[in-house]
Image (cartoon, helix red, strand yellow):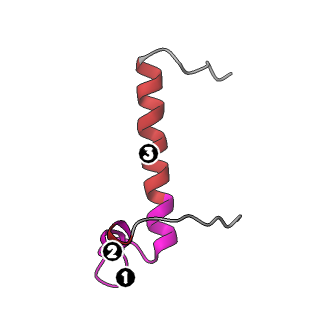
């Protein structure tokens, strides 16, 4: 799996860390970020579909 690097504000990282770990929803930051990206892409696809911007997949 490719690795990437991103810079994010400390406040956002702190919020993310609240959801990571033994008491959180995610095992680690990578899992949390992957889930967030998937969710965001799903939402963008739904918006594009409503506006007729998605190409038909065959």
Q: Residues within 10 Å of mark 2 (few under 14, many from 20)?
A: few
Q: Which residue is labeled 1 in the image?
A: 21
Asked if marks 2 and 3 touch (Cβ < 8 Å), the reply is no
The image quarter in which residue 57 lies: top right
The residue at the point 52 percent across, 65 percent down is 7
Q: Nearer the viewer, mark 2 or mark 3?
A: 2
* 16 over 43 or under it: above or below: below
State how far apart marks 2 and 3 are (Cα): 20 Å
**Magenta region, residue range:** 12-34
Find disc 3 in the rendering and name its residue.
Answer: 40
Q: Nearer the viewer, residue 57 or 28?
A: 28
Residue 14: which disc? 2
- Labels 1 and 2 touching (C-beta < 8 A): no
First along the sequence among labels 3 and 1: 1
Q: For the residue labelled by badge 2, is the local secondary structure a helix, a strand or a loop?
A: helix
Mark 3 or mark 2, which is nearer the start of the sequence? 2
Mark nearest the camera among 1 and 2 is 2
């Amino acid at each position: 799996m490719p690795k990437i690097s991103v810079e994010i504000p400390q406040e956002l990282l702190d919020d993310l860390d609240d959801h990571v770990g033994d008491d959180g929803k995610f095992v680690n930051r990578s899992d949390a970020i992957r889930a967030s990206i998937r969710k965001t892409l799903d939402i963008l696809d739904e918006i594009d579909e409503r506006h007729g911007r998605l190409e038909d997949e065959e």
